[in-house]
C-alpha cells in the first residue's frame, strides 16, 4: 500500500471523525458505500514512528492468515522510554460509570454524536456538587440538535435520552427528573411501541423512588394506550399487559394502582374471545396477587368449557391452584 502524500489526488471519501471514549467509528455513509452488511472485513493497521497518522489497509482472508503468522513471530514492542510513566491497569474505573448499551437500546442515524453529548452531560451530573443546569443544557441540546425528518429515528432519540435520565435519577438521586421526562420527552415519542415502553420505564422508576402518585398517572396512560389497539391485535394487547405486570409485580402499590389494574384486566378477561387469552389474563391476575379475581375468571372459563375440551384439565389445575392460594392482604393507600 502506498503511503506517500495523496493531498493532490481526488479522494474517494473524505470526512472528519472524532475519537470518543469507545473508539473510532466509520461514518454510516462510508460504511454503506464501502462494505456489505454481512461481509467480514479485515484491516492491517499501521502507525509510523512519527505517530502522526493511522493507516488502514483492507486485506483479503489469505493475506490476513499470512500476516497473522508474521505478527506472531515478531519480537515484542520495544520497552518504554526511561522516565516514561507506566499505566497501571485497575480492576475498577474511578467514579461512577454508565452502561451505554442499556441507554441506546435501538440504533439510530446520529447515535454516536448523541452519545458524545450525553457523555459530557454525565460528567456534569457526576461533579460534586452536581452542575445540574449545565448538565441539563447538554441534554436539551441533544434533544434539539439531532432531530431528523424521520419519526422513527426521533422516537429512538427521545427514548435513549429518557433511558439516560433514568440512570441519572438512580445514580445521583434526582427524582425531580421523572416529571421532566413525562412533560418534555413522552409527548414527543411518535412511535406507539416506544411510547408505551417509555411510559413503562417511568412507571418502574416512579415505583422505585416511591413517587406513587406519578406511577398512578403513568399506569393510567399505559392502559389508555392499550385500549387504542384493535380487537384483532390481541397479541399486542396481551404483550403490553405482560410488560406492565413485570414492572409492577414486585413493587409496593397503592390501592388506586390496584384498582386501575384490576378493572382493566377484568374488562379484557371477561370481554375477550378465546380460551388462551383468558388464561393469560388469569395468570396476570395471579402474578399480581389478585387471587379472588383470578379465581373468579378461571372458574368462569372452566364452567364455559364443554366436557370433551382438551383444555379442561389445564383450566381445572389453574382453578385448584388459585383456590388454595392465600388471599391478597389489604394494601395501605400511600397517596
Image: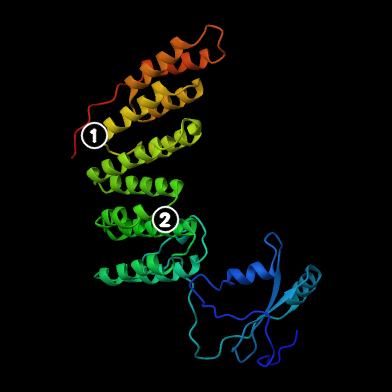
User: How far is the residue under mark 1 from the one under mark 2?
Assistant: 27 Å
- Tell me what residue is drawn at x 47 percent, y 22 percent: 273
List x then y, in percent, for residue 231. 47, 30
Visible in this render: residue 103?
A: no
* Residue farthest toward the front in the current orientation of the protein: 149
- Mark 1, secondary structure of its residue: helix
- Tell me what residue is drawn at x 45 percent, y 12 percent: 302
Marked residue nearer the N-terminal end (1 or 2): 2
- Mark 2, secondary structure of its residue: helix
Which mark, residue 206? Answer: none
- Judging by the rendered image, the residue that carries numbered circle 1 is 256
Crowd band around label 2 with a 10 angstrom C-alpha radius: few (<14), some (14–19), many (20+): many
What is the quadrant of the C terminus in the image?
A: top left
Name the image colouring: rainbow
List x then y, in percent, for residue 244. 39, 38
Taking the image as shown, residue 23 lies to the left or right of residue 74, namely left
Q: Is residue 243 above or below residue 8?
A: above
- Tell me what residue is drawn at x 27 percent, y 43 percent: 217
List x then y, in percent, for residue 74. 73, 79
Q: Is residue 282 above or below residue 218?
A: above
So how many labels did they put on this image? 2
- Tell me what residue is drawn at x 49 percent, y 79 percent: 87
- Judging by the rendered image, the residue that carries numbered circle 2 is 159
**Depth check, front residue: 287 or 272:** 272
Amino acid at each position: 500500500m502506498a503511503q506517500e502524500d495523496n493531498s493532490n489526488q481526488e479522494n474517494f471519501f473524505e470526512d472528519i471523525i472524532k475519537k470518543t471514549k469507545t473508539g473510532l467509528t466509520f461514518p454510516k455513509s462510508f460504511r454503506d458505500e464501502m462494505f456489505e452488511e454481512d461481509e467480514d472485513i479485515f484491516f492491517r493497521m499501521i502507525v509510523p514512528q512519527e505517530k502522526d497518522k493511522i493507516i488502514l489497509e483492507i486485506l483479503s482472508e489469505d493475506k490476513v492468515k499470512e500476516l497473522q503468522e508474521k505478527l506472531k513471530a515478531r519480537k515484542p514492542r520495544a520497552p518504554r522510554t526511561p522516565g516514561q510513566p507506566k499505566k497501571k491497569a485497575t480492576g475498577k474505573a474511578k467514579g461512577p460509570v454508565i452502561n451505554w448499551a442499556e441507554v441506546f437500546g435501538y440504533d439510530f442515524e446520529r447515535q454516536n454524536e448523541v452519545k458524545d453529548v450525553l457523555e459530557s452531560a454525565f460528567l456534569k451530573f457526576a461533579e460534586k456538587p452536581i452542575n445540574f443546569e449545565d448538565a441539563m443544557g447538554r441534554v436539551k441540546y441533544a434533544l434539539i440538535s439531532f432531530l431528523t425528518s424521520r419519526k422513527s429515528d426521533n422516537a429512538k432519540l427521545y427514548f435513549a435520552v429518557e433511558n439516560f435520565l433514568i440512570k441519572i435519577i438512580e445514580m445521583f438521586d434526582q427524582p425531580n427528573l421523572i416529571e421532566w421526562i413525562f412533560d418534555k420527552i413522552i409527548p414527543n415519542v411518535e412511535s406507539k411501541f416506544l411510547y408505551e415502553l417509555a411510559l413503562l420505564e417511568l412507571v418502574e422508576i416512579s415505583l422505585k423512588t416511591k413517587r406513587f402518585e406519578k406511577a398512578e398517572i403513568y399506569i393510567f396512560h399505559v392502559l389508555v394506550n392499550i385500549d387504542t389497539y384493535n380487537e384483532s391485535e390481541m397479541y399486542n394487547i396481551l404483550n403490553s399487559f405482560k410488560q406492565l405486570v413485570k414492572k409492577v409485580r414486585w413493587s409496593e402499590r397503592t390501592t388506586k394502582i390496584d384498582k386501575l389494574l384490576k378493572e382493566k384486566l377484568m374488562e379484557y378477561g371477561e370481554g375477550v374471545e378465546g380460551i388462551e387469552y383468558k388464561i393469560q389474563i388469569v395468570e396476570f391476575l395471579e402474578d399480581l396477587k389478585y387471587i379472588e379475581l383470578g379465581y373468579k375468571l378461571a372458574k368462569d372459563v372452566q364452567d364455559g368449557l364443554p366436557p370433551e375440551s382438551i383444555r379442561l384439565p389445564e383450566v381445572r389445575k389453574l382453578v385448584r391452584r388459585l383456590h388454595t392460594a392465600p388471599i391478597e392482604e389489604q394494601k395501605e393507600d400511600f397517596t
